[in-house]
Structure formats: structure tokens, C-alpha cells
Image (cartoon, helix red, strand yellow):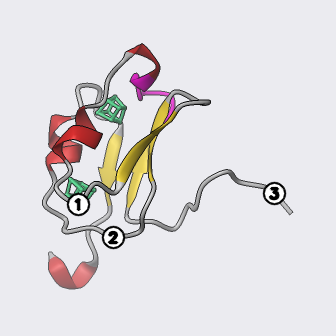
Amino acid sequence: MPVTTHITNVPVTVDEDKCIAHKGCTVCVDVCPLDVLAIDMIKGKAYMKFDECWYCMPCEKDCPTGAVHVDIPYLLR
Ligand code: SF4
Ligand code: SF4
């Protein structure tokens, strides 16, 4: 069984190769009105800490490297 640090079936995912949180970026965490995103201090990457989302999108739009992907449920599109 593969062991993962974070839940992977959450609506917001972060491409860790693109995320520059290790360089001090916290944009997605700052713009999220629900405070569901966080920075993993050990990895230096952003991730979805709580599985809750308004699909308001600033995290994806404002990420300077395009690392955030919000998976909008079909019924909300
Ligand atoms: S805004 Fe983008 S680069 Fe910055 S911490 Fe969030 S995912 Fe990483
Ligand atoms: S879409 Fe909105 S509520 Fe969901 S994680 Fe991004 S900023 Fe937060």
C-alpha cells in the first residue's frame, strides 16, 4: 500500500513541482476565505488541509506559478 502524507481526493490540489511555498509564497493560503489551505512546513509546499471549498477560485487564479488546481464538481459548473 502506498503511503501518502495528505488526502488526495480533495477538490483543491497543488502541483508540488510548481509550488514555491519554500521560497516564502503564501498567496493561496492568504486569499482563501475559508482558510482551508495551508503550507506544509516540512515539504515547503501548499496543500488542502480541510476538505471544504466554496469554489470561488482565487487560490487557482492568484497562484503565481499556476500550481493550484480546483476541481469544480460537475453540478456546480
Ligand atoms: S500560491 Fe501557488 S506557489 Fe504560492 S504557496 Fe500557493 S500553491 Fe504554492
Ligand atoms: S476555491 Fe476558494 S474556498 Fe476553495 S480553496 Fe480556493 S480560495 Fe479556498
Circle 2 is placed at which residue position? 52
Q: Is the CB of mark 1 within 8 Å of ligand 2?
A: yes
Kindly indicate the quadrant of the structure image that contains residue 63: top left
Residue at 86 percent of width and 63 percent of height: 1
Q: Amino acid at mark 3?
A: Pro
Left or right: 55, with 52 as reference point: left
Residue at 33 percent of width and 50 percent of height: 69
Circle 3 is placed at which residue position? 2
Per the image, is 70 magenta? no
Specify the quarter for ligand 1: top left
First along the sequence among labels 1 and 2:
1
Per the image, is 19 magenta? yes
Left or right: 65, with 41 as reference point: left
Residue 3 lies, in percent from the top left, at: 78, 55
**Residue at far bottom of view:** 75
Kindly indicate the quadrant of the structure image that contains residue 61: top left
Mark 1 and mark 2 in contact? Answer it, CB < 8 Å.
Answer: yes
Q: Which residues are magenta?
A: 15-21
The answer to whether residue 77 is above or below residue 31 is below
Element marked by disc 2: loop
Dot 3: within a 10 Å radius of its alpha carbon, few (fewer than 14), some, or many (20 or more) residues? few
- The circle on residue 34 is 1
First along the sequence among labels 3 and 2:
3
Depth check, front residue: 32 or 18: 32
Mark nearest the camera among 1 and 2 is 1
Residue 21 lies, in percent from the top left, at: 41, 25
Mark nearest the camera among 3 and 2 is 2
Q: Amino acid at mark 1?
A: Leu
